[in-house]
Amino acid sequence: MTIAKAHPPSEVLAAFVDARLPRPQVVPVAEHLADCAECRFVVESAAEALDEVKVYPRTALVGWLSVAAMVGVGYLLMPMARTIWEMRELRGMSQGQVRIIEPRVTGGFAYAGRPRTMRSGARDEEGPPPEQAIFQGKAAELLEDAKNNHFASGAHARGIAHLMLKETPQAIAELTSVTAVHPDDAKAWSDLAAAQIVAGQYAEAHAAAERALKIDPKLNEARFNRALATYNRKPEDSVAEWNDYLHHDPTGPWSQEAKEKLEYARQQ
């Protein structure tokens, strides 16, 4: 039985993600991934996890996909890889400088202060700060590059890009499609909660964040979004959830903001 017909062993998929797979095995694995949604999901998740801890091996993987492209399947997988690279660049741009929305997004986005609120017509006409405009420009590029990515990574990335572009209904639609196909994807549920908070759908956001935490109790992005959904609806009801967040993240960059919201909630 060939690799293309059977699920490749986990070590083979890991080698593919890390661009360590011998060239003779690249094509059969790529062929399998083109037809197997289950293994594509594993590869996408592994690639995202790898991307959070080190620079993604773009050059090597391009070479592997070029080999696969000789039989056609590389063109199917290239959008997935390109989307992951674009997401890495978008996260890199966030590094403590840009925050478009109040809730937390998964994937390693760095902490930044609360989004600046425009209160006067004159200031509105000035447009967003330069760094925000650049960040949203990169989000627009990601959206364009991911439009032909029909894997879960594509829909998830499009959802985040729409959210950064303040196109909330489209973000909710994309992220809902991911949770429908992959109901055990905790990050997709958490990001859906973030989009629903921006849309003012606090009950739905709370439910989505709860779903994420049932899948992955360590996902602090979902824990923050759960508390924020309650806080935006009725601050005094969010005390227990902010305490729970601070129990799991007592000193992280988001903790100070959580402490401020907790203090306000206690005063209500």
Image (cartoon, helix red, strand yellow):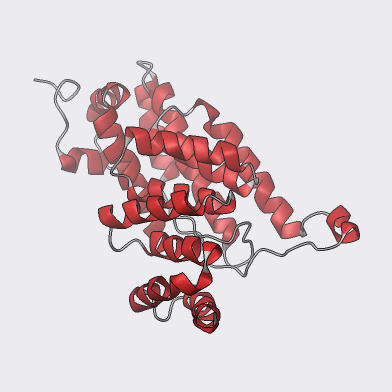
Q: Quadrant of the N terminus?
A: top left
Q: Is residue 70 above or below residue 167?
A: above
Q: Is residue 192 above or below residue 111?
A: above
Q: Is residue 88 above or below residue 264?
A: above
Residue 262 picture location, percent across and down: 49, 78
Q: Which residue is the extreme one toward the right?
A: 122
Task: Out of 64 and 76, give the one closest to the viewer.
Answer: 76
- Residue at 34 percent across and 74 percent down: it is 248
Q: Which residue is the extreme one toward the left?
A: 1
Q: Is residue 96 visible?
A: yes
Q: Would residue 33 appear left or right of 153 to someone viewing this image?
A: left
Q: Quadrant of residue 245?
A: bottom left
- Residue at 46 percent across and 30 percent down: it is 79
Q: Is residue 18 visible?
A: no
Residue 46 picture location, percent across and down: 30, 46
Q: Would residue 236 appear left or right of 64 to someone viewing this image?
A: right
- Residue at 63 percent across and 39 percent down: it is 141
Q: Quadrant of residue 16?
A: top left
Q: Quadrant of the C terminus?
A: bottom right
Residue 15 picture location, percent across and down: 24, 42
Task: Out of 125 and 133, give the one closest to the viewer.
Answer: 125
Residue 99 picture location, percent across and down: 62, 61
Task: Out of 197 and 66, give the one closest to the viewer.
Answer: 197
